[in-house]
Image: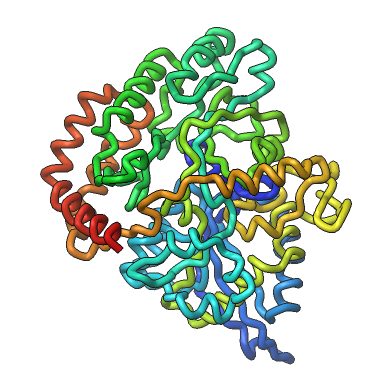
Amino acid sequence: MKSFKKIATVAGAALLVAGLAACGNGGSKDAKGGKSGGKSDTTTLLMYQVGDKPENYDELMGIANKRIKEKIDVEIDLQYIGWGDWDQKMSTIIASGENYDISFASNYVSNAQKGAYADLTELAPDHAKEAYDQLDESYIKGNLVDDKLYAFPVKGNVYGQQMLTFNKQYVDKYKLNVDDINSYADAEKVLMEFHKKEPNIAAFAIGQNFKVSGDYDYPLGKDYPFAIKLDDEKNPKIINQYEDKDMMENLKTYRKWYEAGIIPTDAATNTTGFPLEGNTWFMREETQGPMDYGDTVLTNAAGQPIVSRAITKPYRTTAQAQMANFTVSNVSKNKEKSVEFLGLLNSDPELLNGLVWGVEGKAWEKSGDNKIKLLDGYKPNQHMAAWNTGNNMLLYTQDTLSDDLVKERDKKIEESIVSPTLGFNFKTDSVKTELTNIANIMSRYKDSINTGSVDPEENVAKMSKDLEKAGWSKVQEEMQKQLDEFLKK
């Protein structure tokens, strides 16, 4: 996973953030009839996933496809697209009408409204009933677009918090205190201290596409300058988050850090990232939720101790509900089989645990009904990530994970805050031209502003003027109108 992409809630009963991944093209293959001398009725589904391909992909998928074929007579052709290429490649695939079956959602609401994804409102409960019935209501409500469901969400972290995550080996080595950090500003002291000790290691490891966080919900995602401030529950308003005073203070902090060398000088253009398991970073930003069991999941992923501090509240938001969605292409010739496979992936413990934990007997072994012991063969890049693979409640937990942590998980879920705007999805039909223009403007400004590479006050002012010319006010007015109507319901 890239640090600047965050481990988007590395959800899961302990697992890794190896991240499913992807690349490749090709059409959906329905292998019926086929080879000389024999006949196969097995359907092969073409599936796109985001992230980095596991090193033992062939072994993992060989085992998985055997199980899938036995259960539903389907095989999966899983192709990976890296984070840096994901949005552009999936946009091209969708625009070209390429015949594929399943994909990790790309710009979910926008593409659903454009007709790119199949309507699963009836297909999901009919062909994936067991998995569908296990979904928290927040996932359904948060993924309705024009009152229809176009995604099968991964049941993982039903709420999310942004965390500042520290490489504990450096915390211990230099006796740094991170216990009282609750905001970006609070982290400044330890960052400065670390930078003096290790000037050649990224004190705050961020890169291109990183976004400064706050207690906001984003109706169109963080790439757009439209947000709802979540602490204003009685009267939610659509704002440009970059103009909000709290966000501006954080941006000023980032600028100070950039000038002090805390943030890498190439942060606005760096697409390589900083491996979680490496020693090239001191602090990074991650998303965590209840299925991460505190820092258990990140520590597993890193292969070294990790310690984190929350800087946002535990909200159930629309964005969190849409964190890891799988969609079925509207051009797929295998819609029912695709949904059936998603149902299996999210209801079959043997299939899911084999993908998320790795090869049984090499990476792990059972130590109880729902407990496992990690073996020496458990490696960071030899399994798939829980957060964007399948139902995290099916995942076995490590034998080192106490029952108290599981109870704490359930308590945190119960106490999490439901956003007043959960389920609000903006209908973009009347402002598509304006949104295209706004997206083009944001592509010029957002990376440099969010990484502290430029003066925020000066550049946010310039950006706001350009956004106004592009139609920001028109979009804001329409979005506010729709939000007010949503809240009345």
Give the percent coordinates (x, y) of residue 321. 47, 55
Say if residue 1 shows up in the picture: no
Residue 386 falls left or right of residue 4: right
For the residue pair 415 and 195, the one nearer the viewer reads as: 415
| Figure check: 164 above or below 178 | below
| Figure check: 144 above or below 207 | below
Q: Which color scheme is applied?
A: rainbow
Give the percent coordinates (x, y) of residue 252. 32, 21
Say if residue 47 shows up in the picture: yes
For the residue pair 344 and 36, the one nearer the viewer reads as: 344
In the picture, the quarter occupied by the N terminus is top right
Residue 13 falls left or right of residue 52: right
Please name the residue shown 60% across and 76% down the image.
129
In the picture, the quarter occupied by the C terminus is bottom left
Q: How many marks?
A: 0
Q: Quadrant of residue 342?
A: bottom right
Please name the residue shown 55% across and 25% down the image.
283
Please name the residue shown 22% across and 65% down the image.
429
Please name the residue shown 65% across and 67% down the image.
345
Give the percent coordinates (x, y) of residue 71. 72, 78
Q: Quadrant of residue 47?
A: bottom right
| Figure check: 341 above or below 244 | below
Residue lying furthest left: 469
Give the percent coordinates (x, y) of residue 167. 63, 25
For the residue pair 439 and 368, the one nearer the viewer reads as: 368
